[in-house]
Image: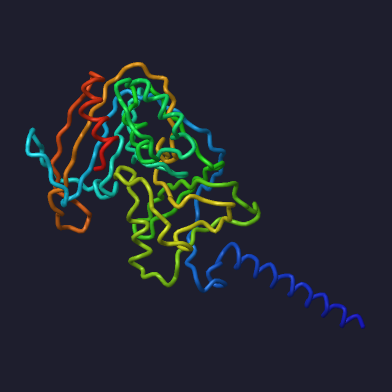
Amino acid sequence: MKKVKIKRKYVLLALVGLFIGYIGLRYYIKPEWFDSEHIYHKVYNYKVSDVKPQKKVIQDINIEFIYDKDVEKPSDGQWEESTRTDVRLYDNDSVLHVTFTDKSKATIPIFTSRSGPAFSEESIDSRLFKKLSYRFPELHVNEKSSTIELGSVLMLYQGDTLFQISEASTEIQFQLKNTKTGKLQTYYQYGGAPDFNYFRPVFFLQYQSNSTAENQAFFDDYDTSKELNYWDTRYDLGSNTLDVKQDYAFYNLFYSNQFSNLPVGISTTGDTFKTTITETYVIEDVDGGDKAVKVISRSKTYTDKMTYTTEVLDKKLNNSR
């Protein structure tokens, strides 16, 4: 009987060892062995923090209207030609280029959304539009949703404040090692509180069904100095994502922690009118595969509100483009 008890003891220890080994492999060392769908990448310096909304005061305003090749440009005025790679990012629309009093800059497309970069759906409304319109008493305009969005930005003053408004309660910061260069790259993800188990490491997932080039493209896109500050994951659901569950998460994985990562609202704290309006027309696409285009542009800076109302506000808010 004694020998049998010893054997049972070793069997039990072996089973415990196998279980511990399984847990180690499954969740720590080789989780991809148990998941035929994904490639697992190690995550470095994973950190979760509460979102603390920032605010910045406007110093300079430049509102740019972008037109595609099929739109006829005016024949008058002086135009400058250049090659740009950011124009297609804004879908031939209008954008706010703003410099703040702390010397930082941001480019914010003029539409509303619950995720950035954009203006906040919660802030840009008819009440704000009406308050801003008191600055331009000669303006008479019918309020429409598109008019409210564009008009609110067109009536900004120097000294106005942009402040972050977001449904996101947490910011996840983490690093990944570029599989080709070996360099660590920092990413930011916004959303609800993560469901995180402190006893399990965090991994970053990519589809095994993707080609090697497709998966590498995610890492190679990383560039904190380029115009597009994020990788848009809407078209890669289930790929290029953390294995951390959240109530919700924004579609974008940001490359740097910029002010415009989250949608912004407007506070009418300014008292000085000075706005530059830039018109940009696409001439032709440039070969090279990076969405570069040749454009011509011209700019005019306004300090007289009457002239601005006549030349800009009346035309942009009462006529369709």
Foreground of the two, 256 or 89: 89
Residue 140 vs residue 177: left or right?
A: left
Residue 292 vs residue 30: left or right?
A: left
Q: Is residue 138 above or below residue 72?
A: above
Q: Is residue 235 above or below residue 152?
A: below
Applied colour scheme: rainbow
Name the image quarter holding the C terminus.
top left
Residue 203 vs residue 126: left or right?
A: right
- The image shows residue 142 at horizontal and vertical percentages of 35, 34
- The image shows residue 251 at horizontal and vertical percentages of 45, 52
Q: Residue at x 62, y 52 (%)?
A: 196
Residue 154 vs residue 30: left or right?
A: left
Foreground of the two, 296 or 8: 296
- The image shows residue 125 at horizontal and vertical percentages of 45, 34
Residue furthest right in the image: 1
Residue furthest top in the image: 271
